[in-house]
Image: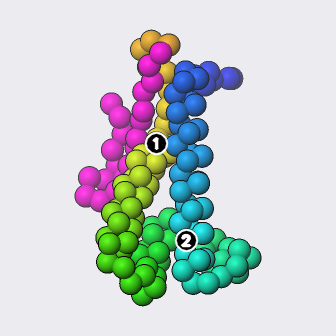
């Protein structure tokens, strides 16, 4: 018994792929910045940051910058960038952890998100 797999139009697949690739670049840049603030070369930096979640990387960057950067203008700009990075993570997670399928026409898509989190419990699309 075979089931058909819902097709997602190529432009939407490409957009989802761009989110994935660009988020990975953002994460790598944050790691790189942490390495530089601590004064680590790449191998040591990878050891320190590779197992950290994105939110933990952003927290580490924020904490280190307060100790290592003395310019209040730079700190304020970095604070704004870290806020944007966390917002980007939320949007990326919505995209990555959803089920995508073809919409009512070949050019549209449907996004389905299931959850069982508190306080609602299990919610599924109807």
Main secondary structure of the magenta stretch? loop
Q: Residue at x 45, y 24 (%)?
A: 109
Query: Which residue sits furthest bottom?
Result: 67
Query: Which residue sits furthest top?
Result: 105
Q: Residue at x 52, y 27 (%)?
A: 12
Q: Position of residue 90 (x, y in %)?
A: 39, 53
Compare marks 2 and 1 and give the one earlier in the sequence: 2
Q: Position of residue 86 (x, y in %)?
A: 39, 60
Q: Mark 2: which secondary structure?
A: helix
Crowding at dot 1, Cα within 10 Å, few <14 / some 14-19 / many 20+, comes out as some
Q: Is residue 74 left or right of residue 3?
A: left
Report, in whole angstroms, how far the alpha carbon at label 2 lies from the one at label 1.
Answer: 26 Å
Q: Can residue 52 be spotted in the picture?
A: no
Q: Which residues are magenta?
A: 107-126
Q: Residue at x 53, y 56 (%)?
A: 26
Please state which of the two labelled residues, at mark 2 or mark 1, is closer to the viewer. Answer: 2
Screen quadrant of the N terminus? top right
What number of labels is visible?
2
Decide which of 72, 22 is in the foreground and name it.
72
Question: Was residue 16 drawn as part of the magenta stretch in this picture?
Answer: no
Crowding at dot 2, Cα within 10 Å, few <14 / some 14-19 / many 20+, comes out as some
Q: Mark 1: which secondary structure?
A: helix
Q: Which residue is mark 2?
A: 33
Question: Was residue 116 drawn as part of the magenta stretch in this picture?
Answer: yes
Q: Which residue is mark 1?
A: 95
């Amino acid at each position: 018994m075979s089931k058909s797999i819902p097709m997602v139009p190529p432009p939407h697949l490409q957009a989802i792929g761009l989110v994935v690739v660009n988020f990975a670049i953002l994460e790598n840049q944050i790691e790189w910045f942490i390495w530089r603030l601590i004064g680590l070369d790449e191998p040591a930096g990878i050891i320190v940051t590779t197992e950290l979640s994105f939110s933990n990387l952003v927290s580490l960057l924020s904490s280190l910058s307060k100790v290592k950067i003395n310019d209040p203008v730079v700190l304020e700009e970095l604070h704004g960038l870290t806020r944007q990075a966390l917002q980007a993570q939320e949007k990326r997670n919505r995209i990555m952890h959803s089920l995508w399928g073809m919409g009512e026409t070949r050019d549209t898509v449907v996004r389905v998100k299931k959850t069982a989190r508190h306080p609602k419990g299990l919610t599924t699309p109807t």
